[in-house]
Image (cartoon, rainbow, N blue to C red):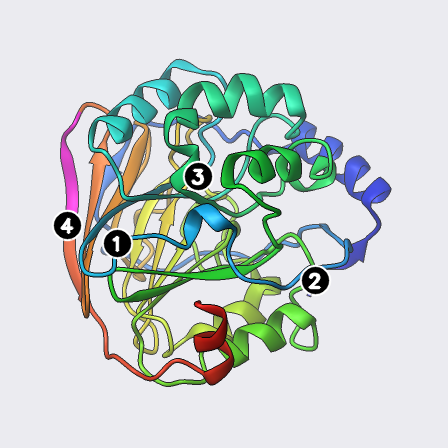
Amino acid sequence: MAPFRTRSCALVALGLAALAGCGGAPTTTTSTSTGTSTSTSTSTTTSTRAPVVTHAPPALRRLPSRRATVWAVGDGADGGTGGRELATLIRSRRPSLFLYLGDVYETGTAAEFAGHYDALYGSFKARTAPTPGNHDEAQHALGYDPYWRRALGGRVPDYYALRVAGWQVLSLNSEVDHAATSPQAAWLRERVRGGGTCRIAFWHRPRFSAGLHGDQVDVSPLWDSVRGHAALVLNGHDHTSQRLKPIGGTTEIVAGAGGHKPYPLNVGDRRLAYGSTGAPTALELRLTPGRAQLTFWRVDGKRLDQTVVRCRPGAAPRSARRRGG
């Protein structure tokens, strides 16, 4: 587990990370892997702000119940051309819901949320479910929190649940305490207690990845809680597009190719069912009860990968039914 630090220390760590490796080397390869796994683990500083556990903010409580088109991507809000063009593609597809997988560059200030995020994704911010990235967390009180409070009509908790098209969607947080003994992990275990797998969990840093950052061992408590209980896990952080082979009935997707500095990808990682890097790419999920069609779309509108994931319904925990999540 990565050490937890105060916000002031997180600011220092974030500055060092920006200098040391948060923009990987550009590459333009696109491929599906067939080789050997060589992914490595890294440790990441996280903050200790006290979590507020509650239901989803008001704007996210009125989503379609039978059919929805959901888009997801992270690591694109940097003010650059690639991210802007990808946002234009997503906007043209009129998403029912957008999942932003974290990181507003460079440090998630209020000015960067206005100039780098809102300028790209602002037209559908009222139907966006966010999670913070490592670039957002240190200044969350000045950037992330007030931006999303205004956009969604209420405070956005550190982690929360919502429902769309027969699926429970869990926004988790890899940048606050997520140890097995943390309030977040306890809340998550309660949420998945009702059986079934019709859940999509998302947070910023991936448990498994064939990209530059590799496996993030410290988020194991989140992964372990949803493995076999969620059909899908979505992450960003590595600036690549990856669909991993199912592990324990759960398919992990890395959709971090939002437009910021592409990262190299280990195309020989045997865990990959599909992988690409280079061009900005986003994930589309067409959801109906029990079924999700997943498609990676490149910025020029080319379909790169498509698959279908099915889930098994189950009863929601009583507390979740009361809160609508």
Please state the horizontal and vertical placement of residue 151, each as a whole percent of the image.
Answer: 51, 35
Rendered position, 217 above or below 75: below
**Image point (29%, 34%), residue name:** 281
Residue 185 appears in the picture as rendered: yes
Residue numbers of the magenta segment = 301-305
Q: Residues within 10 Å of mark 1 (few under 14, many from 20)?
A: some
Identify the residue under disc 1.
64
Compute the Cα span from label 3 to label 4: 19 Å
Compute the Cα span from label 4 to label 2: 34 Å
Please state the horizontal and vertical placement of residue 245, each as a whole percent of the image.
Answer: 27, 64
Q: Amino acid at mark 4?
A: Gln
| Residue 74 image label | 3
- Looking at marks 2 and 3 on the same chain, the residue that comes earlier in the sequence is marked by 3
Identify the residue under disc 4.
306
Compute the Cα span from label 4 to label 1: 23 Å
Dot 4: element: strand
- Looking at marks 2 and 1 on the same chain, the residue that comes earlier in the sequence is marked by 1
Compute the Cα span from label 2 to label 1: 32 Å
Compute the Cα span from label 1 to label 3: 23 Å
Identify the residue under disc 2.
177
Q: Left of 30 or right of it: where is 157?
A: right
Please state the horizontal and vertical placement of residue 311, each as a whole percent of the image.
Answer: 23, 73
